Image (cartoon, helix red, strand yellow):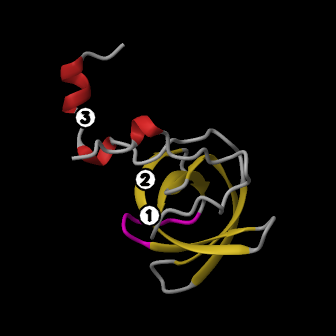
Amino acid sequence: MRSTAAVLAVSSSERRRSQRSFQVVPLVIRGELESKKVFWEDTFTSNVSVHGALMILSAKVCIGQKLVLMNPQTWQEEHARVARLGTSDGSRTQVGVEFERAIPDFWPANAAPAKSASALPAAS
């Protein structure tokens, strides 16, 4: 268990705005490579939330890059930006993306839990 000091030391960029759900959800990603060539990639998530997802990509992307995520089950498309690059195996990289706004209905109903009361900021 973390100490209070350790919890307070976590930077604001590491705090989660919403609860994550570990779920594999198929996605189609569209974006632009450095060469200005448009790419499409079928991939999947490893976890999701109402604010974004963590997925695996072969395309080389960079922090801040804009992407379009399409849920092939519903054909719904949403814009997102690359917020984090994780581990890479040389051909694929873990990519964390953030939606422009919270989108609770993008993922399957059982994928993205609602924000819990404990995650909400205290009323002032």
Q: For the point 37% across and 68% down, which residue is it?
A: 64
Q: Nearer the viewer, residue 108 or 82?
A: 108
Mark 2 lies on a secondary structure that is: strand
Q: For the point 43% across and 53% down, which residue is it?
A: 85
Residue at mark 1? 82
For the view shown, which residue lies furthest in the right direction?
73
Q: For the point 68% across and 42% down, which residue is it?
A: 23
Residue at mark 2? 85
Tags 1 and 2 touching, CB below 8 Å: yes
Q: Nearer the viewer, residue 103 or 62?
A: 103
Q: How crowded is mark 3: few (under 14 residues within 10 Å), some or many (20 or more)?
A: few
Kind of residue indicated by mark 2: Leu
Mark 3 lies on a secondary structure that is: loop
Tags 3 and 2 touching, CB below 8 Å: no
Q: Up-down: is 117 above or below 59?
A: above
Quarter of the image containing the N terminus?
A: top left
**The magenta segment:** 59-65
Front disc: 1 or 2: 1
Q: How crowded is mark 1: few (under 14 residues within 10 Å), some or many (20 or more)?
A: many
Q: Which mark is residue 10?
A: 3
